Amino acid sequence: MKLSMLKEALTNIIRKPITKTYPITKRDIEIPELHRGLHYVDFSKCTGCSLCAIDCPSNAIQMTKIELKLGTNPKNLYPIIDYEKCVFCYHCVYICPVKAYITTNNFELVRVTRNNIAEFQYEESSKRRDKMTILLVISLLIYTVSVLLLTYIVVRGPTVSDKVLSADVALYTSSVILAITGIIIGSEAMAICTIILILWAYIRA
Amino acid sequence: MSSEYVVFILSLLVILTAIINLIGVLGFYRFKNFYLRLHAASVSTIGGAFYPLLVLSIIAFIEKEHYIGVSLLLSAFLILLLSPTGTHALARATYRKRIAIPEPLIGDKIKEEEASS
C-alpha cells in the first residue's frame, strides 16, 4: 500500500498540472464573431461629443481629459469605459456619430496585475502605432549599418575625393535617421534638426 | 481603419529605401573607380535619402503632425537640389586636379573636345 502511494507521488512530480494558470495560458474556446466583448475608442476619430456617456444605462463611461493633441478633439475629452460597470449593451457603439468605437469579441476581463481594467483601452489604441514603429525601427537599424560603413570610408578612404563624397552621403543618411526617430517619438525638434543638418552639408560643400 | 493599412504599406516602403541605401553603400566598397563610386553615391542619396523623407512626410501628414511633415518635405526638396550639384562639383574638381585615375578607361570625351577646339 505505502509503496503504491509513493509511486503515485513520484508520477505527480513529473506530470503536468491539470489546472491552468488562466490569464497566462488560455483555453481554446470558439467565440462567435458577433459576441459583444470588450469595446474601445479609436482616439483619433473621437470628437469628444460625450453622447455615449449620456446614453450609457449603467453610467460606465466617464469623459476624462487626456492631452493627446490629435486635432479632432478640441476639448481633449475622451470616453473611458469602466468594464466592471459595463453591461455590454453596445448603446454607445450605435449612438456614436463618428463611429469611433471599435468592437471586439474579446470577453476576458481578467488581468494578472491589479491595475484598472481601463488600461486595456490605452493598450489597444496604442497597438495601432506599434506596427508602424516596429517597421520603422527595422529600417533605422539598416540605416545605422550603412552610416557605420560610410564612416569607415570617411576615416580610411583611398582618395580625398572619396572621403568627401562618403561624408556627404553619410550626412544625408543620418538626416533620414533623425527624421525616422522624430516620427517615432513624435517631436518637431528632430524634424527641424534634419533641415539644419542638410543646410550644414550645403555650407560644407 | 483604412489609414492604418496605408501607414503600414508606407513604412514597408521606408524599409525598401533603407535596403536601397545599403546597396548604394556596398557599391562604395565594390566599385573600383572613383567615377563609378559617384554613381553609387547618387543611388544612395536619391533612393536612400530623398524618397524616404517624402514617404515619412506623408506618414506625418496622415498622423496629423503637420510641422514634422512640412519640415521633412522641405528637407527632401533641399536634398534634391543639393546632392546633384555636390556630386557634379566633386567630379569636376577631381577631373581637373587628376586626383582619381579612371582605371578601366573606355573613352575620354572631355579630352577629345578640348583637343579639337
Image (spheres, rainbow, N blue to C red):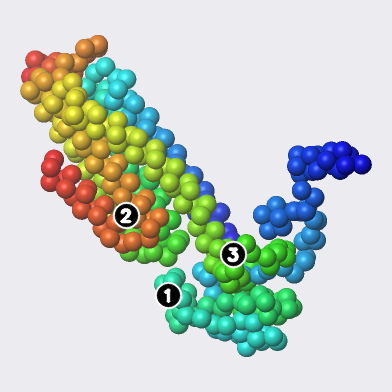
Q: Chain of mark 2?
A: B
Of the 4 image quadrants, the one containing the N terminus of chain A is top right
Marks 3 and 1, the one that precedes in the sequence: 1
Q: Quadrant of the C terminus of chain A?
A: top left
Q: Residue B106: x percent and y percent? A: 24, 12
Q: Which label was assigned to residue A192?
A: none
Residue at mark 2 shares a chain with residue at mark 3: no
- Circle nearer the viewer, 2 or 3: 3
Is the residue at mark 3 from the same chain as the one at mark 1? yes
On screen, residue A164 versus residue A33, left or right, reads: left
Q: Say which quarter of the image contains residue A159.
A: top left
Secondary structure at badge 2 equals helix
- What residue is shown with label 1? A67
The residue under the point 53% across, 70% down is A43
Amino acid residing under circle 2 = Leu
Mark 2 is surrounded, within 10 Å at the Cα level, by few (under 14), some (14 to 19) or many (20 or more) other residues, namely many
* Chain of the residue on which disc 3 is drawn: A
What residue sits right under mark 2 in the picture? B72
Label 3 is placed on what type of residue?
Answer: Thr
Q: Give the image quarter of residue A187.
A: bottom left
Label 1: state its secondary structure. Answer: loop
Q: Position of residue A17 (x, y in %)?
A: 76, 48
Q: Residue at x 40, y 59 (%)?
A: B60
In the image, what residue type sits under mark 1?
Glu
Q: Tell me the subunit letter for badge 1.
A: A
Compared to residue B108, the image places residue A8 above or below, namely below
Percent of width and height locating residue B4: 54, 57
Q: CA distance from mark 3 to mark 1?
A: 26 Å
Tally the marks.
3
Q: Is residue A48 above or below residue B87?
A: below
Residue A26 pos. (x, y %): 72, 54
Question: Is mark 2 in CB contact (under 8 Å) with mark 3?
Answer: no
